[in-house]
Amino acid sequence: MNVTSIHFRLSHKIQDEAFSLTHAATCNLYIAVGHKSIRLAVVDTNRNKFVVLEDYELLSVFTPVQVAEQLRLIATENPLLQEKGWNIIRASFSNLHFTLVPETLYDQEHQTDYLRLHSQFNPQHDVVLSYRHSGLEAINIFAIDVALHDALRQVFPDRPVQMLHQTSALIKSTLHQANRITERKLYAFVERNYVTVIIVSQSGLEFCNIFHYLSPEDFIYYIIFVMQELKLNPEQETITVWGDITHDSTLFTTLQKYIRHIKLGKKPADVAYSYKFHDLFEHRYFELYSMHLCE
């Protein structure tokens, strides 16, 4: 007997009173699939405004197959995932399996070979995809578990879904925020047990990588290691932080011990947010908002 277990809870929901599913044709649906969360957002393209946000926390979920199972279960009861008439459906995935390749060197027939040089993904269980960064003239090649890929296709069987790696959304947004900078900038996006570190300079993207940490000591080690390798001084540089971190968390306290200047990031600009979003911390849900800047 096949028993499907529910291991999620809706931890946060925002919906503007002006939003209705009857307006789906002029709205974009964004889905951010993480290791421990599935987050949804809707943007009204006529008003260029975020009008819906839903955050599902995944409980007792440890593998991509289990995440895929929870995505299917959420879709059975979630009106946003049951609606098929969206203007654009875009989904991002968070994992360690990605690499950036200059567009001039990219050959689609060899994208699996490029990724294999930088990631220990499983070709038997993963689907290799790519996303073109027009401003960078680079291709983000990434892999997602076939169970996740298939689950999303089952939710939207007759609609194209643009799939991208979470780093693409983060890169797009940090470059957008760092426009016209005169010095290198250091950014970190924090998830439970994962941190993405990005460095941007006048010439564009200098560094992007994801690190898996199990303790605050691991967390700060990776950040300081990157700073040392790129000759950034923890006593002088400012790190801008987004994601699942708060002022009173152990991770934030650990950052303060080693880096003098810490700033919590803000939501992406050039898009509006319903007044109902104003009670959220500015640095939360950055990965979800940033998908709106992708193409």
Image (tube, rainbow, N blue to C red):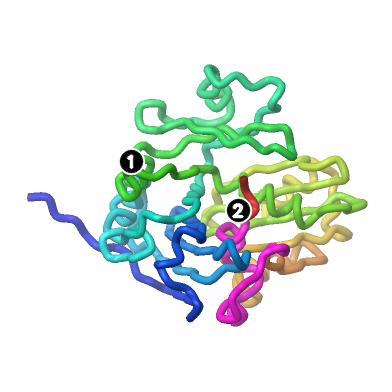
Residue depicted at 69% across the width and 54% down the height: 173
* Residue identifier under label 1: 150
Q: Amino acid at mark 1?
A: Asp
Q: Secondary structure at mark 2?
A: strand
Determine the residue positioned at 70% across, 52% down: 223
Q: Is residue 288 magenta?
A: yes
Q: Position of residue 206 (x, y in %)?
A: 78, 40
Q: CA distance from mark 1 to mark 2?
A: 27 Å
Image quadrant where residue 275 sits: bottom right
20 horizontally vs 254: left or right: left
- Above or below for 130 versus 171: above
Question: Which residue position is annotated with label 2?
Answer: 195
Instruction: Read off the magenta span.
Output: 268-291
For residue 262, side relative to residue 172 (left or right): right
Q: Residue furthest right?
A: 182
Q: Residue at x 21, y 59 (%)?
A: 5
| Amino acid type of the residue that numbered disc 2 sits on in the rendered structure | Val
